[in-house]
Amino acid sequence: MDAVAGGLPMMTMEKCLDFPLLTKRTVLAHVSVCKGCCCGAVEKGKAEVPIDWMKDEWKKRGLKKRLQLTITGCLGPCDLSNVVNINCSAGMVWYGTLRDFSHYVALLEWAAASAEAGELAPLPEGLGSLQFDPFRRAASIAS
């Protein structure tokens, strides 16, 4: 992994050539929004996930061909609900505890800016404190 695109490390061209299958439809990124057992479960005291709004806006703005939006079942970890995962050729970024509507607006604006530019825009600065790595345990838990 070499350079950086939108805050994510880039894969080298040699690595990309390792894959035997090709698709006719490539996207800049794939955004997965959890709507599983805990995410958006207002009956459990969790914050709402504005699924219908996101899908409507994604469609209205014509983002689907450049950035895929998928509403998923449980992405985990449930202790950080509401979870969003962004995957691209450079890697992945995870966000948790998205509680405010403004968090989802920031993601939508990032997606729209990326689609317009034809490349990934820098990730929303306002969401930096919500990033986590699901493959790394907190130091206090690990010891």
Image: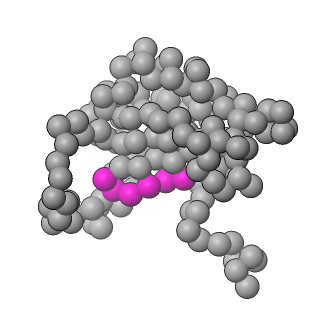
Q: Residue at x 15, y 58 (%)?
A: 20
Q: In the picture, residue 19 is in which quadrant?
A: bottom left
Q: Residue at x 41, y 27 (%)?
A: 112
Pick out the residue farthest to the top.
60
Residue 130 is situated, as x and y percent measured from the top left of the image, at 64, 50
Residue 126 is situated, as x and y percent measured from the top left of the image, at 60, 42
Residue 42 is situated, as x and y percent measured from the top left of the image, at 79, 32
**Along the line of sight, which residue is nearer the eye, 109 or 31?**
31
| Position of residue 62 in the picture relative to residue 102 (left or right) | left
Q: Residue at x 66, y 56 (%)?
A: 77
Residue 118 is situated, as x and y percent measured from the top left of the image, at 26, 34
Q: Is residue 128 visible?
A: no
The secondary structure making up most of the magenta span is strand
| Position of residue 25 in the picture relative to residue 122 (left or right) | left
Q: Colour scheme of this structure image?
A: one colour
Vertical position of residue 4 compared to residue 103: above or below: below
| Position of residue 72 in the picture relative to residue 24 (left or right) | right
Q: Which residues are magenta?
A: 89-94
Q: In the picture, residue 2 is in which quadrant?
A: bottom left
Q: How many marks?
A: 0
Vertical position of residue 90 compared to residue 56: above or below: below
Q: Is residue 138 visible?
A: yes
Magenta highlight on residue 29? no
Q: Residue at x 19, y 43 (%)?
A: 23
Q: Quadrant of the C terminus?
A: bottom right
**Along the line of sight, which residue is nearer the eye, 58 or 112?**
58
